[in-house]
Image: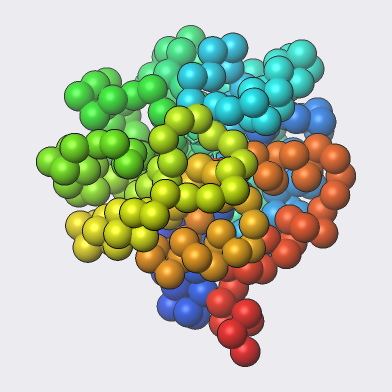
């Protein structure tokens, strides 16, 4: 459970010569009752872990696709607590590692210690908290440590070098390398220096480096994973899942299975 489960999932994939693929989905988009089936689909399609987003009224890092999914979930009454309860219900039937993505406010509403405890009960293995700066992490790290839940840190293209070094050292589970400046969302191209940026992160980091933001095609996956251990895909998957168009999701995930792509 927890950090160990994430580490084991990544090691298994990388030892096979594949790259990691972490789809992001908005919890409760389409109704919370669909969540378990969606997670099973992603697992069967070959996802390494899933990043499960919690809808929030002020999602500062999210682009239009994720924001709209969040609005749909909020309209449906989905809350952090509700998602955790659903995860508790389905914990025994699940093997796919879960990384929960939530802003700080919903965590504070539950209370930090209680939140960590319920995450443990729900089988949450890692957390991404985009509005928690390095300087303030200590409000939550002792509670997470207690339950062995990984805190995944984000490195930005614009972060100064010393800050990147610190983030790369501290991160647990994996390092989330943000590959664009701005919010989440589908893009056609990446800046030329993305390869250098990723390779440098790889040198500084003991855990896998995953590239995310703007990744939306198998070509992106193949290009980026030349310089890192895997990718995170959000907006494209949220969009396809909402439309019920699942074949392209399978193809995207399969594109990270290099052992199959190359043979
Ligand atoms: O949607 P994209 O461009 O594929 O990027 C992934 C992203 O959506 C997902 O990881 C995410 C959704 N909301 C976030 C907030 C902060 C960091 C990351 C995220």
Measured from the top left, where is residue 16 in percent x and y?
49, 80
Colour scheme: rainbow
Is residue 87 depicted above or below 105 in this figure? below
* Labels in figure, total: 0
Q: Residue at x 55, y 27 (%)?
A: 62
Is residue 26 depicted above or below 198 in this figure? above
Look at the image and tell me whether residue 221 can be seen: yes
Q: Residue at x 56, y 59 (%)?
A: 220
Q: Is residue 166 left or right of residue 91?
A: left
Residue closer to the observer: 20 or 61 = 61
Q: Is residue 88 left or right of residue 211?
A: right
Q: Residue furthest bottom?
A: 263
Measured from the top left, where is residue 105 in percent x and y?
46, 13
Image quadrant of residue 73?
top right
Measured from the top left, where is residue 171 in percent x and y?
29, 45
Q: Residue at x 20, y 57 (%)?
A: 204
Is residue 149 depicted above or below 56 in this figure? below
Q: Residue furthest left?
A: 162
Q: Residue at x 24, y 29 (%)?
A: 134
**Quadrant of the rendering where the C terminus is positioned:** bottom right
Measured from the top left, where is residue 29 in percent x and y?
75, 30
Look at the image and tell me whether residue 84 can be seen: no
Image quadrant of residue 147?
top left
């Amino acid at each position: 459970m927890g950090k160990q489960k994430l580490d084991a999932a990544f090691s298994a994939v990388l030892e096979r010569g594949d790259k990691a693929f972490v789809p992001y989905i908005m919890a409760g988009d389409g109704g919370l009752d669909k969540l378990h089936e969606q997670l099973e689909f992603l697992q069967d399609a070959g996802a390494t872990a899933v990043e499960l987003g919690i809808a929030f009224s002020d999602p500062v890092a999210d682009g239009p696709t994720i924001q709209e999914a969040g609005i749909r979930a909020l309209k449906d009454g989905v809350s952090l607590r509700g998602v955790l309860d659903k995860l508790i219900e389905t914990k025994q039937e699940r093997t796919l590692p879960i990384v929960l993505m939530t802003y700080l406010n919903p965590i504070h509403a539950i209370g930090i210690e209680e939140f960590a405890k319920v995450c443990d009960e729900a089988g949450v293995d890692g957390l991404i908290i985009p509005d928690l700066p390095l300087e303030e992490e200590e409000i939550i790290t002792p509670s997470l440590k207690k339950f062995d839940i990984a805190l995944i840190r984000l490195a930005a293209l614009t972060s100064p070098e010393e800050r990147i070094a610190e983030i790369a050292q501290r991160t647990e589970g994996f390092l989330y390398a943000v590959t664009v400046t701005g919010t989440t969302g589908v893009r056609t191209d990446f800046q030329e220096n993305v390869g250098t940026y990723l390779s440098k992160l790889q040198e500084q980091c003991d855990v896998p480096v995953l590239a995310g933001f703007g990744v939306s095609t198998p070509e992106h996956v193949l290009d980026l994973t030349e310089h890192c251990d895997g990718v995170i895909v959000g907006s494209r998957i949220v969009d396809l899942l909402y439309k019920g168009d699942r074949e392209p999701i399978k193809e995207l995930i399969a594109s990270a299975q290099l052992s199959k792509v190359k043979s």
